[in-house]
Every structure is written in C-alpha cells, then in structure tokens.
Image: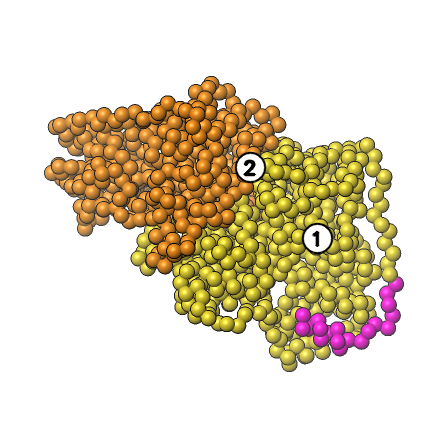
Chain colours: A yellow, B orange
Amino acid sequence: MKQSIGNFLLRRLDEVGIRHIFGVPGDYNLEFMQQLEDRGAPAWIGTCNELNGSYAADGYARIHGLGVLAVTNGVGALSAINGIAGAYSERVPVICICGSLPLRSLERGEMMHHTLADGGRGNFYRVFAEVTAAQAELSPENAVVEVDRLILTAWRRKLPVYLELPSDIAYIEIDTPDEPLRLTPAPSNLERLEACAKAILKRLDSAKSPAFLLDLDADRFGVSRQISRLAEKLQMPVAILNTCKAGFDETSPLFTGLYLGIASADATREVVEKSDCLLTIGLRRLDSTSAFFTDAIPASAIHLKGGSVNIGLNNYQAVSLPELLDELIKKSDSASKRRAPIMRPPPAVSAPTKAPLTQAHYWKALEKFLRPGDIIVVEDGTSFDGATEMRLPPACSFVGQAVWGSIGYSVGALLGTLCAAPERRHILLVGDGSFQLTAQELSTILRHDFKPYIFLINNRGYTIERAILGKNARYNDVANWRYTDLPSVFCRENTAESYTVATEEDLQRVLDAPHKGLVFVEALMDQNDSPVSLIRGGHAFADSDFGPTGPQFAPDANIPLPL
Amino acid sequence: MKQSIGNFLLRRLDEVGIRHIFGVPGDYNLEFMQQLEDRGAPAWIGTCNELNGSYAADGYARIHGLGVLAVTNGVGALSAINGIAGAYSERVPVICICGSLPLRSLERGEMMHHTLADGGRGNFYRVFAEVTAAQAELSPENAVVEVDRLILTAWRRKLPVYLELPSDIAYIEIDTPDEPLRLTPAPSNLERLEACAKAILKRLDSAKSPAFLLDLDADRFGVSRQISRLAEKLQMPVAILNTCKAGFDETSPLFTGLYLGIASADATREVVEKSDCLLTIGLRRLDSTSAFFTDAIPASAIHLKGGSVNIGLNNYQAVSLPELLDELIKKSDSASKRRAPIMRPPPAVSAPTKAPLTQAHYWKALEKFLRPGDIIVVEDGTSFDGATEMRLPPACSFVGQAVWGSIGYSVGALLGTLCAAPERRHILLVGDGSFQLTAQELSTILRHDFKPYIFLINNRGYTIERAILGKNARYNDVANWRYTDLPSVFCRENTAESYTVATEEDLQRVLDAPHKGLVFVEALMDQNDSPVSLIRGGHAFADSDFGPTGPQFAPDANIPLPL
C-alpha cells in the first residue's frame, strides 16, 4: 500500500490502539500536525507546554498501555525530556515523536534555528539515547522498519523511545505493508519456559511460606490478574512496594501490606523476610523503595522480570512473564488449606469536628471517600506518603512516581489518565509547591470538559523538603496563590466548583455533597504538619543524602521537622 | 583558607559579581540551599519550576554578564535543560549547579531516586555534555580547580557549563586559595594581535566602503562601545543581524538597519553586500538570521570572533576581540570626511482612533512608548517580528531568542532581567500561546514586587505557526484564558494594574496614563492579523521546512496566512 510516511506512522499508532496524542506544535512538526488533523484520529490534545505533555503521555500510557507525545526539534524535545526520562525510570512505554530538521538542511550542512548553531549535529539524538530504550531518525528508506521497531520496543520493554521525523518527509509516499501491526509480547523459548516453570513449581511445592512481592512490572506487564489467580490458588500472601500501590486488591485476605524495609508493618516484614519461597516481580532495590536499603529480601527469593527469571545461580532468558504465570497457574497444585481471611477494620475516622484540618484527619477522610475503580493520581511528597497509607478499594489505579519523583508530574499525568479512561472517577492529590510547576495544564483539563476531583494542600511550601532540611527556611516557601480562582481564569465558560476548606467539617461537607463539575478543593493546613511517614522518611533522606558531616547534625542547624 | 566546598563555590560566585541565583530546591541540593541561606548572599530567587529558572538565569546573564541556576539531580536538571541548551545556542554564560547523588551511593553502586534506576550511571552528565561547554563532578580533591575552570570557561566562551555538586560533600572543608577569582579575558598573543590588527588596518586604509555587520557576540563580549568608537572614527556604517538588535544605537547616523538577506531594506543590503571591507562580529549563518540563506556576504569580509579572526585565507588564533578593537581604534586614522547624518523621520503613528487594534498600529504605538535605557524582553514569533521592526531609543537592551526560538522564554527571562537591573524600565512583549508555557513565573515577579510592563497579545493561538501552516487549524488554537485576572491569582496582595484593550484609543489611554504597579495589558487582536514580516517569514519557513512535496503546495492544503 502506498502511503505517506506521516500517515503510515499515524496508521501504526492507530493500529496499536492509540486514541490520543499529546504535545505542542512547532514549525518542524507542522506537516505531521496537519496530517493528524486531516486524518481525524488519533485525537490531538495540545498541551500548554511540552513537559506537561510528556507527563500526560506517561499518565495515559499507565492506564492505556502505550502513550504518544509529539514535539518539535530541540526546544520542544528538550522541554519534554524530564518526562521521558521519568518514563524510563518508572518503566512506562511512551513514544516521543520529534519533528526534526529537514533532511535537506542536514545534507547541505546548513545551520538551523532550534539547534545549538555550532556546526555540530546529532546532539539531541545522543541526548535522548541516554534516556530512551531505542531511537531512530526516519528516512524514506527506513521508515517502515523503524516505526515498527520503535513501537514494539516501547511496548515490549515498557520503556520510552525517541523517533525523529524530519520535517520535509512526512508527505513523501513510500511502500508500506498492508498487514496491521500487532502488539505481541516477545514469545518465550518454550524449552526454557518449561524448565523455569518446573524449577519454580518444585520450590513452591516444598515451600511452607511462599509469598509474592510486587514491584511496578506487575502493573506494567499487565499481570495483576494472573498474580491474583496464582496467589489465590496457592494461598500465597502478597506484599507490594510503594511503586506498585493498587497492584493487588487491598481488600483481599491475601493482601499483606506495603513492604518498605524497616518502615514496614511487622506482619508485612514477617511475610516477606521470612518467606522460604518469595516470588518477586520486577524487583529493583532503590533508596526510595527500600527505606534506604533496610529491606531484607531472602537470598532464596526467585526474581521474575518481564522477560527473564533469576533462581539462585540460574538465570532463564527468553521467558515471558505472562506466559510463565499462565504455566505456573496451570501446573501448580491448589493449596490444601485456605488462609483465614484477615479481618481488617474499616479506617477509624472520627466524626468530623470544627477543628482545623490536620494531615492525620485529611488522609483518613479521603480514604473513606474512595470508591472501587477510582484512578488516583498522586503527587510526590506529602501526597504520595499520605496516599500510600490509604487502604484502596478494589480495582483502583494509583498513578505516581515512587522512583523518579519529579514534582509537578501529577497535574500533567491527570490529563493523560482522563483521556485514557474518561468513564472512571479521577482524583488528583497534590500539594501547593508541586502544583505550581505545572499548574497551567488545569486549563487543558477544563478545555476538554473533564471533571476530576482535585485536592490541593495549601501549606505554603515544599513540605517534603522541610522534612529533610530547612524546616523554616525561606527556600522552602512558595508564593501563596489564590488557587481556587484558577479554574475561572483558565476557562471563561468555567463550571468548576471551587472550595477552600480549613476544618474537618468543611472538608466533609464537600466530600458529602453532590457535584456536577470539576471539583477543586484547596485544603488549608499547618506548615509544620505532615504525615508521620514523611517526617521519618525526611530524616532518613537527610542521613542518606548528606552523610555524617551533613547540616542535620550541626548544633545550630536549621533542622528538619521533628518526629 | 579552610572553607567548605559549598561556601567556596558561593564565595567564587560572589567574587565574580553574582548577586542572584535562580532555581528550585530538591533533596540533593538542600545542603547548598542551606549554605546559601546562612550566608545571605547571593540572593536566592526560587522559581516555580526549573525551566523558568533556566530562562531567568539566561535573562540575568544577558544583562549582568553571568547567570547561575541551581537544581537537583535528574528531575531538576532535565527540566532545565531546554534553557541551558538555549543559552548555548544563543551564547549566554550560565552556570548550572546540580545537586547530585551523594558520592557514598556512587561508591556503593546503590540505585537512587531521581535516576533512571537501571544500574547505569553518568547519563545526565553525558546529556549535559552535549549542550554545555564544560562539565565537572565536584569532589573534595578537584573542587578548587574545577569551580574556577567552569566559571572562567562560561564567562570567557559565553557558553553555559554544568557543575555537579554531590549532596554529601557541600559541608566538607577543603583548603582554598585566599586570592579572589577575577574574570579576565583570555589574553591575546601579542605578536598575532599586532599582525592581525595590521592586516585589518591595511584593508581598512584602502577601503572605499568599510562597514560593520554585528551578530550577537558584539553584545556578549561587551564590545558595543568599542565598535561605536571605531565606527565613529572611520565613519563606517553599521548593520545588525536580528540576533543583535539594540547592539548599536539606532538613532546614530551610522546605523544602517537590520540585515536579513532578501528581507532587508535595499539601503542595508547595499551597505553590507557592496562593502569592500566588511567587518563582521561573531557572524553565524542560520536560516533564521539570514532569511534562509539569501544573504550575500562579500567573500572579502573579515570575520571577527571572540578570540580569533578570519581574513581571507589567514586565520589568527589567540586574538581577543576587545583587545583587537582597542588596537584598531588606537592605530587607525580618522576618516577625512564625515558621513552626512541620515535624517530619519520619527515613526508615523496616526492619531489613535476607535478602530479595532491592528498589528500595524500596535507596534508603532509601542515604538513611540519606548524610552532610552529600556530593557525590552521579546517573545519568539509575532512579538519578535513586530519588535524587531521598531526603531529603538539609545541604550536599550533587547532580550530575545532569534536562534533558539523557544516559546515561553520571555516570561522567565523577564524575571532575570528584573533582578539584574531593577533600576531600569522593563517591557515584556509576548503572545498568548507562548505565555501559557511559563505563565506561573509571573507569580515570582509579583512576589518580589517588580513592576514591569507586560504587553500580551490575545489572538487565540500560535500565530507564527498559523503563518507557516494551518491558518485555521485546531492544533494552532490555545485556550482563551482570563489573562488579566492572573496577577490577583498569583499574588494576594496584588497591586498590579490590569487592562484589556481592543481599540487604538484603549491602548493609547494605557500608554499615556501614569502607573504605580506592574502594568499588565491584554491586547485583543484578530486571529489572522500579523506583522507582514511574519507572514513573509512563515512562507519561507514552510518552503524550507517542508520542501517541494510539502502540504503548502497541495491544492486542498490548509495554507498559511495570505500575504
């Protein structure tokens, strides 16, 4: 089939299920923009800037399975790179399409705008090679191969890729295959798959205390349901890392809590650390996911990755995680005894009073507000710590960055999750300091008439930094905006409902009321109030980041928040 | 002198005249933040996000000579990189200080938050090596050497540099030199300097039509005054590129206009293209500075750079531009005849009427509003084209990106210029599409009680893109904010004056009125109105970017704005 390069790319994205593309137009990508508009699908979601667009593509991919961002050369691509690197860090498949310099100017060696203008070339390509799994510069002769390679690489490896589309070739027709592109996992080597499954089943058969520990690959590779089935069948308890919140039904009797090194509950540590057959999914040991390496993973643990498995001294490559789990479910014997369900009391929320709102009350009240199926988009810092402690109803999604931790992420990501699943309820949990980085993307959310719940803590600063260093330091202060006026500034036909709440009762009234529009809640809280876990974490961060000569040990230091 | 590494770095910045540091705190840079706050100087100017901070550091450096940005590892540095690459493209010395991973975790090979978490290391350092002139990772043993090397490299080469300060060493004491650091240009090799000056003087002596053509190095190397003196002495006419607007007194009889290839005035082309001894300063040929390579620089032109000179087949290295110009001024004979001053009529602004505001009227009215010494910060696109056509009073500064062209730059840059020269009048010229990328930085401008004039064109989209492709395309539309409400949202003690103007008279009333606070003017204009130069440029961009198969030639194309 004869097709222009731009339309071939769009057709491929369509075939793999992309319904929305995020980004900002620029002269080097206008051909592609025009092809997109003429084609009518996927939908174009222009964002206020490229960083926000990259966050949106990331949020979209977490819910939808794959996300796409379109930017222009240099200025656009580099504005977005923090979000693309974040997708790498957090294992999110995002395709970054960069409208790049025309091939004519590269051939002629001409210096162009949106470049470093020093006679060099390829700098931005090399920059992106540092933070993506694959890269390509399209040309008429390689477009068919490279487009498919990049899309498949992103999806199979759950990592971002970078694709340059030179501005003068989008309209050039090439021969393209008739067959649609299908997203298929890299197939396993059957012999190894069976050998690996057999080795794991042998360990499971003799185990007295098998258990699961889930890192984010459990979500990214879409195997949550299989893990549930295997856990059910074998009555294995399941613990999660903070990267995989909502990766397992928290109301299940098998759910055994968040494992975070010495910051874990005793029962959770017992299950994980004493397991004689711990199956980890995608485990990575990071300071922020292991309470600064205070975890104690049994040496006998079996480590499952997306395409390989580690068992003791053995390593199995070419073993696909979904296929392996299917095999384990099929071949394992059901556990003879079922575990007694653990009866968890509902969250103890005292009746709301006229007392000023505290972090302790806030997170409990919000926990009670959650419903099955909610998408909860969570900002780094206070919101992440507070929300991680909430027990989630079944079938929720939890979108946050436990590893990359880029403040401002959540506002852009919310736009992406809204596009990916408009039928679900979306709840943004964010603080003032973080919100200010990316606030303008609220206007795009309003422009498309989405109606999420936005809960913003106004406590006048970077609370997570205060917990680490500089409790009262000026560098941790932010300007005190009139946040609740923003919806009417960003949207002239605004129908959003804005509330400022200062007491427990104020908050409860908003939570209980029926709502029709976007709900924007500014919650006023004390500057020195924060979740206890944040304060503990802050002290640990200070020790890890600054070491034994750090300012936190100086007698006259501007110390972090007290425990 | 014993000093901690962080305090040594701050002392050096202080010694070279840095009075403000821009950026965002993060856990890896909090030690340095605390040292900055304890020291009390330079002043910390926290920005809403890192990209805006990088633009502010760039704007500051353009007025002050050197700028500093402080960010945290990965998330912060990558958010800022577009501004740092822009500083490279536009030759602006900015020092990017990144609070990076503690050396302890690098030594131990631990995976940390704010990284790619794949076991690799050094990715962000390599990323920045692509867009900066020098890089260093500080350690106790190299800190003294590297700090001085990076500061001097940035200042001497007028390029950004990247410095990683590991989070656990800022408080470590080291031996530091007592002598202050001095910013001195790299000294010339005297023999070469004299030989080079002699060769140039010989050419000048026999020349009938010598002239200057100024690119941005004339501003960055601070030689505008010397160029004026030499031009005066020899009665040489001076043309500027659009990168060097305000680089020469536009009311001088020697000023001969903007040279932009075929888009130049005939008189300007004549002076440049027919000169038998054209001295160019820092000339780079770019599509955006040469009207798509339609310039015609005489082959006999002499090209002066910051540290070298090209004369025909000869190349002189180790020749410092300021020293060379001094030598030329000293050794050249004064011209026997003085050029007759060219009498330029003042701008023909017709008396304002009740007619709707047009671009044609707007730029003339603003031109009349300018005063000697103004700092004019100009956004890319419509504002850049409109403002470039204004004749500036003497001693103005013009801050914009003719090469990098990153939309949104101007709002952040304005914060920087305000800090650098609070005693001068600052005027921001920006459009709605660009403003939305970085709008929140207005809050920092208000927070520090600065009182610039902000003129924002509301014509509901990316007008420069409409001029290239997609006149009525949806991808070129932006949301229609209530812009004039933003000051009161961003600042609870707001004293800004907001105006929406729709007619010539509306605008004139605001321009004529006395003002006390920040003045924010939203100018409503037709979506399809734009400066003629922008439309012409748009067509040329389309031809250059898309080539002969591009959509602008298709019969049913969504063509750009008509001429």
Query: Relative to A265, does residue B537 appear above or below in the rendering?
Result: above
Q: Position of residue B249 (x, y in %)?
A: 29, 29
**Quadrant of residue A328 in the image?**
bottom right
- Badge 2: few (under 14), some or many (20 or more) residues near its Cα, within 10 Å? many
Give the residue drawn at x 71%, y 35%.
A499
**Quadrant of residue B259 in the image?**
top left
Tag 1's secondary structure? loop
- State the residue position of label 1: A424
The answer to whether one can see residue B66 in this image is no
Number of numbered discs: 2
Give the residue drawn at x 49%, y 31%.
B522
Give the residue drawn at x 48%, y 56%.
A38
> What amino acid does circle 1 point to?
Arg
Query: Which residue lies most toward the bottom here?
Result: A191
Asked whether disc 2 touches disc 1, contact meaning CB atoms under 8 Å apart, the reply is no
Q: Position of residue B295 (x, y in %)?
A: 25, 46
- Badge 1: few (under 14), some or many (20 or more) residues near its Cα, within 10 Å? some
Q: Position of residue B226 (x, y in %)?
A: 26, 31
The answer to whether one can see residue A45 in this image is yes
Depth check, front residue: A388 or B511: B511
Asked whether residue A324 is drawn in magenta, I would say yes
Asked whether residue B345 is drawn in magenta, I would say no
Give the letter of the chain under mark 1.
A
Highlighted range, magenta: A322-340
Give the residue drawn at x 32%, y 30%.
B391
Query: Which residue lies most toward the top here?
Result: B514
Query: Relative to A229, does residue B478 appear above or below in the rendering?
Result: above
Spatial CA distance of label 2 from label 1 is 28 Å
Tag 2's secondary structure? loop
- State the residue position of label 2: B481
> What amino acid does circle 2 point to?
Trp
Give the letter of the chain under mark 2.
B
